[in-house]
Image: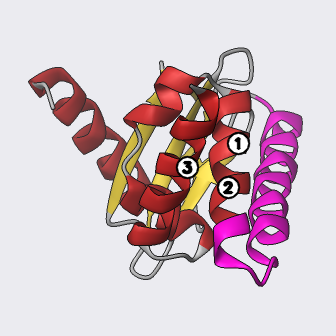
Amino acid sequence: MNSQKQEQIKDILNHLHNKELLVINPRRKNGLILYKPYHAEFAGPGAAIGANFDHDVIDVLPVGKLSLMTPRIPQERINSYLIRRQWVKLAKQISDNTIAQQRAQVILNQFENWFDLETASLLPDETFALLVGVLPQTMRKVRTQSELFSQ
């Protein structure tokens, strides 16, 4: 990881630990994976991060060309909270599937659709596994099968 990206991550973590409210730019294909002690969450375009939501974040991973904004008016804050809730609900829907391989496939498909195949391929198996509650080996297996089918 280059030093500019490391500095960006350090800066984001400082904002989060200071409980500042930021919003993922809704006009870009970008997002932030928030690593927490026992799982990870994805905050996509338009979602709020920080404040009281993310005081327990231990690391972050920008996805796409990350752009953060500070909400200027109360309605922007409210909208960003609602959008964050939608991202959480989507992750819950994926995680509700009792079959681990299907959860792994769905999260992989979602990221390939939200961003692109190249961006999704840069994310580690461990990250996807933490997002939907599967083992990293399950993610690797699903990715390998997907690659074979796409050839």
Q: Which mark is residue 105?
A: 2
Bounds of the magenta span?
73-102
For this view, does 3 lie left or right of residue 59? left
Cα–Cα gap, marks 2 and 1: 6 Å
Prevalent SS, magenta region: helix
Query: Dividing the picture into quarters, in which one does residue 98 lie?
Result: bottom right
Amino acid identity at mark 1: Asn
> In the image, is residue 48 above or below residue 58?
above
Mark 2 or mark 3: which comes first in sequence? Answer: 2
Q: Which mark is residue 145?
A: 3
Q: Circle 3 sits in a helix, a strand or a loop, which is it?
A: helix
Question: How many marks are shown on the rendered structure?
Answer: 3
Give the residue at x 49% y 69%: 138
For this view, does 4 lie left or right of residue 17? left
Give the residue at x 51% y 42%: 32
Q: Circle 1 sits in a helix, a strand or a loop, which is it?
A: helix
Contact (CB < 8 A) between labels 2 and 1? Answer: yes
Q: Which mark is residue 136?
A: none
Nearest-to-viewer mark from 2 and 3: 3
Membership of 37 in magenta stretch: no
Cα–Cα gap, marks 2 and 3: 10 Å
Give the residue at x 18% y 35%: 6
